[in-house]
Image: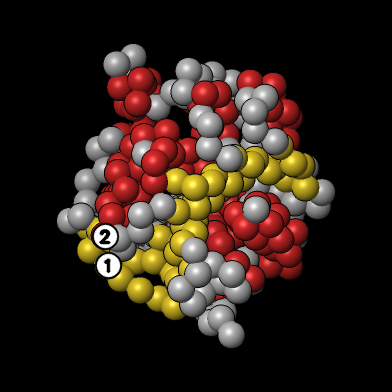
Amino acid sequence: MSDSRLRSRYVMAGRIRTHYSECGDNGPPVILCHGGGAGSSGEAGFGRIMPALGSKFQVYALDSVGGYGNTDPYFPCTDGVQNRVDHLAAFVDTLCLDRVCLAGNSQGAWVVAKYALDHPDRVAKLFLVASATITSAMGIKGPETEGMRALRAYDGSREAMRRLLEALVWDKSQITDELVDLRNQAANRPGAPEARKVFQEGTQRLTRDPNLRLKYEMQHTLPRLTLPTMFIWGEEDRFAPAELGRQLEKLLPNIPFKYIAKAGHQVQNDQPEIVSNLMQDFFSS
């Protein structure tokens, strides 16, 4: 019988003391990458689906650099989201994982896609969830949304964290005091606010500087990715509307898209049974 408990672990990934949540009992490795909102972490992003995935796979949900979760916030992420890709690479190498399945939500979807583009020999399959970061990297300009406004308005308070979560999920019953506290405490631990500021400035440079942007954009690379890939999107997404997914789908004809009813930006948390079944079927086939 597999172990479905979430276990808290630390490892030195490169020079970075990295926290991750783990589940399963030595099945094929699956790594999950969370989004980029304040207080994000592996557990907050994927804890609702990890026990089900752990019945077949060894599941790792790392807390990324940039002030997320319980990973060392003092590593300077001057390259923004590219530092998340480098951190993922160090994590995979440190755990001696030869070939993995990857899944990511929102900004985390860009991270795993970029890792797969850089290291296609290390990735078996790719599962992407609702990503305005990928649409931006593909040259699609999205609208100003309620979720983006809530993200920018986060001021470190529990009330602001609750408003952010309300914009990210469709099923409001999951926004418990425990979840609000988990994310808000992570976002306010020593070093985290400063880390997010450096990370955000680095991401802005990466996306706006014409030379650095070559590391960020995907118009000429993602459509040529030959790895088995699946993309899902929540029909009720108020951060990155499903219409963005439909625009992106036209640019990625080789990737199947699936739109999930009664789900917001964190599809895996709004519809955990549907998403965990999709992942298990896709990664097992």
User: In this view of the protein, can residue 130 be seen by the observer?
Assistant: no
Viewer-side residue, 29 vs 105: 29
Which amino acid type corresponds to the residue marked 2 in the rendered image? Thr
Q: Position of residue 145 (x, y in %)?
A: 65, 35
Q: Residue furthest toward the bottom?
A: 1
Task: Give the position of the N terminus as an image quadrant.
Answer: bottom right
Mark 2 falls on what kind of element?
A: helix
Tell me, yes or no, whether the two marked residues, 1 and 2, touch with CB atoms within 8 Å.
yes
Task: Please give the count of numbered marks on the rendered protein.
Answer: 2
Q: Quadrant of residue 144?
A: top right
The image's mark for residue 11 is 1
Q: Position of residue 163 (x, y in %)?
A: 62, 54
Viewer-side residue, 159 vs 151: 151
Which amino acid type corresponds to the residue marked 1 in the rendered image? Val
Q: Residue furthest toward the front?
A: 285
Q: Residue at x 40, y 27 (%)?
A: 216
Asked if residue 165 is positioned above or below residue 51 in the image, the reply reads above
